[in-house]
Image (cartoon, rainbow, N blue to C red):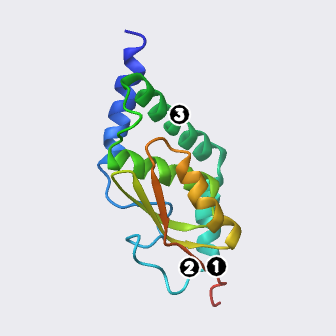
Amino acid sequence: MNKLTPILISGILLFGAACSDGAKTSADAPNSTTENRNSPPPAETVQKTQGDATSDVRKAQANSDIRAREQRNNVTGGDAIRADGDLKNEVRSKLEVNITKGQLTVDAKDGLVTVGGTVPNQTDLAKIEPLAKEIKGVKTVNVTATVAPAVASPK
């Protein structure tokens, strides 16, 4: 029973997360992986989003969620075939914690993960594919994100 409880709780949390539409790394991210912003959000908005994403509580929560999902998949033997929603949410969480200044969207279909949106520099853009491939079940990563530094908002 002690081993079953964490699996049940993880399943309930995962179900709730999988039911959400449009996995985004921030509220400012585009609505789909094919839509790129022409102009990035104001620097103040980026700082607010970054503050939330870089908080120790948020990082711990995201890493805990990823570990729980991986443990569940190891127990159930579902390593090779993963639900699209699981992949989308795990990749989004991984990117959110590691690329804090980006406005990214994630989509997944049969192991193909597409990441769109904007990041502030080339270094963050280069991180997307390797980070996404760290998630079990990700076969291919298509990065459509672009580099677009945040601009200061007019005063």
Q: Judge from the rendering whether residue 153 lies leftward or rightward of residue 73; answer left or right.
A: right
Q: Reading the chain from its start, which is encountered first: label 3 or label 2?
A: 2
Cα–Cα span, label 1 and label 2: 6 Å
Residue hosting label 3:
67
Please, what secondary structure does the residue beneath circle 3 have? helix
- Amino acid of disc 1: Ala
Are circles 3 and 2 on residues that touch, CB within 8 Å? no
Q: Reading the chain from its start, which is encountered first: label 1 or label 2?
A: 2
In the rendering, which numbered label is found on residue 136? none
At x 42%, y 10%, the residue is: 2
Are circles 1 and 2 on residues that touch, CB within 8 Å? yes
Residue hosting label 1:
150
Residue at the far top: name it: 1
Cα–Cα span, label 1 and label 3: 32 Å
| In the depicted structure, whether residue 96 falls above or below residue 62 | below
Quadrant of the snapshot with the N terminus: top left
- Amino acid of disc 2: Pro
Which of the 4 image quarters holds residue 78?
top left
On the image, the x and y values in percent for residue 84 come to 33, 49
User: Which is more foreground, mark 1 or mark 3?
Assistant: 3
| In the depicted structure, whether residue 53 falls above or below residue 65 | below
On the image, the x and y values in percent for residue 43 come to 64, 77
